[in-house]
Structures are given as structure tokens and as C-alpha cells.
Amino acid sequence: MSRKQVLPYFFFLVVAFCAGCSSLLPSVREISQSPWKTFDEAMAAYERVIPNQTTINDFKNLCIDLSASPNIRMLSHLDIAVLVQPMRFEELDEGLKKCLKANSHCRAFEFSPGSITQHRYGNFWLDFFNFQRKTKETGWRFKALFVLVDDLVVYKVWNGNPKIEEYRQQTNPLGPFQESGGIILKFVY
């Protein structure tokens, strides 16, 4: 076979190889374990907690086991005081005032469930040689804070992202040498 006859086959193999390369890019899935699989489930559980009515024993009915559920952060009354420090006492919600007055009888639980997936996409070779990296992040995050005095919920607040869809593109004109400048300077000096 002559060189002219081999060239189309070689070109076809290169194109076929590169076309499927984007599936070789890494993906990351980050899940904060919780009893809720979606943002809506977490929000529904949050809405069933009623300040000055819900007790610590009621949390189990909401699929929240404060001693066994993962990713629960426990805060003391001092942590709450630090959180509200920028505000004047008179401006605080009544539940937070009760908490600060109760001192060691006050505690809080912070829940942070979520599910985030990061998927790199684009040209495999540009990514592999660090010239250009494109990442798509999707999922949801939810955070809820429940403040209790003794065993009664006196305050609650939430924040979160019901639908995350973010795109990032990092371009490095020097490719694999972009971050090696610091290493070279260490050898020179």
C-alpha cells in the first residue's frame, strides 16, 4: 500500500479516536448523605418544623435522627451568639433572643444535604494537556438551621440552591507549563 492510500485510513482513525475522547474526561459526584434525595424533600421536611411547637422528639417523625443522621452540625449557644453578633439584640427574632438568654440550655442543629455533579466536557486533548478545561456543575444544595431551647424549636432558617447549573472554563495559554513557572523559579533561586 502506498502512502497516499494509507493517509485516509490514518486520518479516519485519528478523527474516530478524538471523537470519543471526551468520555475519557473525569467526572465528580459529591453527595452529602441525608434522608432526602431532592431539594423539594428537604424543603418539605423543613416546612413541617413549627417554631414553639416542634420538639426534639418530633424530628424523628420528619426523618431526622439527630444522633444518627449524617452531615448534621451541632452548635452551642456560643456559636449562635457569634452568628448573630453583627445584629443588635433588639433586632433579633424572639426565638434567637430566647436562645441567647437561655445560655447553655440553647443549642442548634444545622443540616446541609445536597447532591452536586461536576462533569468535564470539551476537547480531550486540550483538557489533557491543560490548555483548556471546561466543567459543568449541576445539582442542588440545602441548608437548614434549627435553634432549640431545652427541647423546643424556637427559631428556624434556611437557604439553598434548588437547581444548580454552572459552567466554568479555565484557559491556560501555556498548557502544561502554565503552573510550572513556580517550580522553575525554585530551581533558579
Image: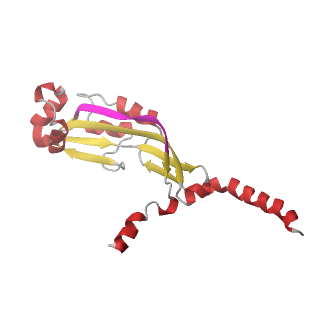
For image coordinates 77% across by 60% down, the residue present is 13
> Which quarter of the image is occupied by the C terminus?
bottom left
Q: Is residue 158 above or below residue 130?
A: above
Q: Position of residue 52 (x, y in %)?
A: 23, 28
Say whether residue 25 is visible: no
Check the image and report above or below for 127 versus 144: below
Q: Is residue 76 magenta?
A: no
Question: Observer-nearest residue: 161 or 136?
Answer: 136
| Image location of residue 111, percent across then percent down | 33, 42
Q: Quadrant of residue 66?
A: top left
**Residue found at x 53% / y 55%:** 131
Please give the range of residues in magenta. 153-168
Which quadrant does the N terminus fall into?
Answer: bottom right
Instruction: Give whichever of 25, 132 is nearer the camera.
Output: 132
Q: Give the residue drawn at x 11%, y 37%.
A: 102
Q: Residue furthest front?
A: 188
In this rendering, position of residue 21 left or right of residue 142: right
Q: Main secondary structure of the magenta part?
A: strand
